Amino acid sequence: MGQRVQFRDTDSGKSVWVHRINKLMEEKKITQQELAERCELSSSVVSDWIGLNKRKGQELREPKILGFQKIAKCLGVSVDYLLGDNVCETPDDERIHE
């Protein structure tokens, strides 16, 4: 069987994908606005998904699969990686699942 994936970071309570997207944006030195433009998404939608300025306790909206696919492609990682799987860090690694 495959590795169990945890979608929430138990220390911060944030979804793993929120943490990973923000970390990748930091590494690539891009803003939420730039990510939105590159992914052809509205900046307000990206902010709703990964915004760091949300009030404590306020839930972030989760992207649908197409949103995850766009962001993963723009950031050069796989959807599996965004969702918490360390095995599939790059899009090419997803071939192992075929």
Image (cartoon, rainbow, N blue to C red):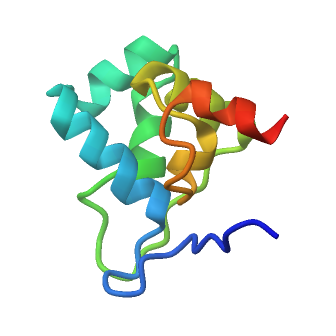
Q: Would residue 57 be found to the left or right of residue 28 on screen?
A: right
The single residue placed furthest to the bottom in the displayed view is 11
- In depth, the one of 16 and 47 nearer the eye is 16
Residue at horizontal 46 percent and vertical 64 percent from the top? 16
Q: Position of residue 7 (x, y in %)?
A: 57, 70
Q: Would residue 27 be found to the left or right of residue 33 on screen?
A: left
Count of numbered badges drawn on the protein: 0
Q: Position of residue 36 (x, y in %)?
A: 41, 23
> Image height check: is 94 above or below 23?
above
Q: Position of residue 32 (x, y in %)?
A: 29, 33
- In depth, the one of 58 and 89 nearer the eye is 89
Residue at horizontal 48 percent and vertical 55 percent from the top? 17
> Image height check: is 75 above or below 50?
above
Residue at horizontal 44 percent and vertical 24 percent from the top? 76
> Image height check: is 19 above or below 92?
below
Q: Quadrant of the N terminus?
A: bottom right
Q: Quadrant of the C terminus?
A: top right
Q: Position of residue 69 (x, y in %)?
A: 64, 30
